[in-house]
Amino acid sequence: MRDLTTTPNQAFALARSATLPPSLDGSQGDNRGTGRQQIAAGTDWDAIRVWLGQYRDQEKTYAAYEKEVVRFYVWVIATLSKPLSSVVFEDWELYTAFLGDPQPASLWIGTKRGRLTKDGSLSKEYRPFAGPLSANSIRYAQGVIWSMFEWLRSVGYLAGNPIIIARGRRKRAARSPSRFLTEDQWRAVLEAIEELPRGTVAEQRVYARWRWIATLFYITGVRTAEAIDATMGGFSAVRDREQGRNRYFLTVIGKGDKERSIPLPDSFLPEITRYRRAFGMSDWPAAGEATPLVFSLRTKSGFRRLTRQSMWALFKELFEHAHAVLSRRDPEGAANLLAASTHWMRHTAATDMLNSGADLRTVQAILGHESIATTSIYSHAEDIKLHRDIDGKHGIDWSGKSDGM
């Protein structure tokens, strides 16, 4: 690693004031896109601000993402003496090692919160880190920074994502069918939501949305993209003449633009009303209603659907709260919650439906799987049957062993 050419504070101050030289500001970065950009940013800092701007209406998400990308950005400038748009995969490997031990500590580690003073200037006492990051925090940082790079690539600002190889390994691991919440972990998620304050209208809306997304993903097993693209107009009722009642469904567009209707149990229906009432809407959606199924808390300019990154961050925050709840009684079981992500909800839904006795083909239809083999990997029924069959019938008896052995 090269010697520091400037301090983290100086690097950030230069970026904020747009006084970085062309060799560092990204206008001449080696990884800049060669086609037509879909954003007007000419420098790395401007591009970062455009990406972050998507989360302005989500205060906690914005703060968490901004912290991660800013300290990576100043590390690249101060330590590597290169622009963000020239970063390569090997640079990311250096940074992950650095996160485990930010040195020199006098420049990088401090206790003062906040970068700015009361007058808006950059504090000389600010340091980007409070100490070394844990493995889970490093993985979180990687997820955030990968998302930023991938978005900048998608809009043409960058030619490629320099950490896509590492992210690919993470994604393959996350697809493992064992990545689901246990009964205790799921209960901790519900407890974390119920512990949220509800004293103000804003707090009531936060509570209502978290309760809604937990219900939605757990009951329906929808994919993130399906939930983001669906609207309230997707709810419908079909008359069950034999039993003289309505049966309710949610229609979503899945992979391959295939439409499917997901059956909704009666326990799901009050949650729709609870969520809508919190935002001043009618108890039940109107036919063809275009309101997003999950939307931003900022509704003055209308109901705006969440982005994929926003949904991911929302669930990460929820799982962190659940981790704190479960840590009170089961620290070991709680640790796994820090690795959980949105897709774990789909795995959890599938596992719980099958373990509760739902027919395999029913669950296949609900989840929209092409192959029943894909659905069957979430069932532990056969494993439990095997265990019951062998338990007590096959073992080892040491009670008659010889003392001389």
Image (cartoon, helix red, strand yellow):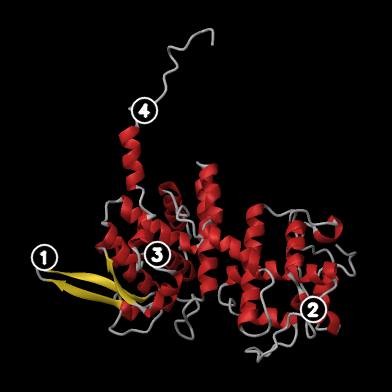
User: Could you tell me which secondary element the residue under label 2 belongs to?
Assistant: helix
Q: What is the quadrant of the C terminus in the image?
A: top right
Q: Is residue 24 visible?
A: yes
The residue at the far top in this view is 404
> Tag 2: residue type?
Ala
Q: Quadrant of residue 251?
A: bottom left
Question: Marks 4 and 2, how far apart in space?
Answer: 69 Å
| Residue 394: mark | 4
Q: Is residue 404 above or below residue 33?
A: above
> For the residue carrying disc 3, how many other residues have a C-alpha within 10 Å: few (<14), some (14-19), or many (20+)?
many
Question: Marks 3 and 4, how far apart in space?
Answer: 41 Å
Mark 2 and mark 3 lie on one chain; the one further toward the N terminus is: 2
User: Could you tell me which secondary element the residue under label 1 belongs to?
Assistant: loop
> Tag 4: residue type?
His
Q: Position of residue 357 (x, y in %)?
A: 27, 51
Mark 3 and mark 4 lie on one chain; the one further toward the N terminus is: 3
Question: Marks 2 and 3, how far apart in space?
Answer: 41 Å
Question: Marks 4 and 1, how far apart in space?
Answer: 49 Å
Lateral position of residue 48 relative to residue 206, left or right:
right
Where does label 1 land, which residue? 243
Q: Nearer the viewer, mark 2 or mark 3?
A: 3
* Residues tagged 3 and 4 counted as in contact (Cβ below 8 A): no
Where does label 3 land, which residue? 217
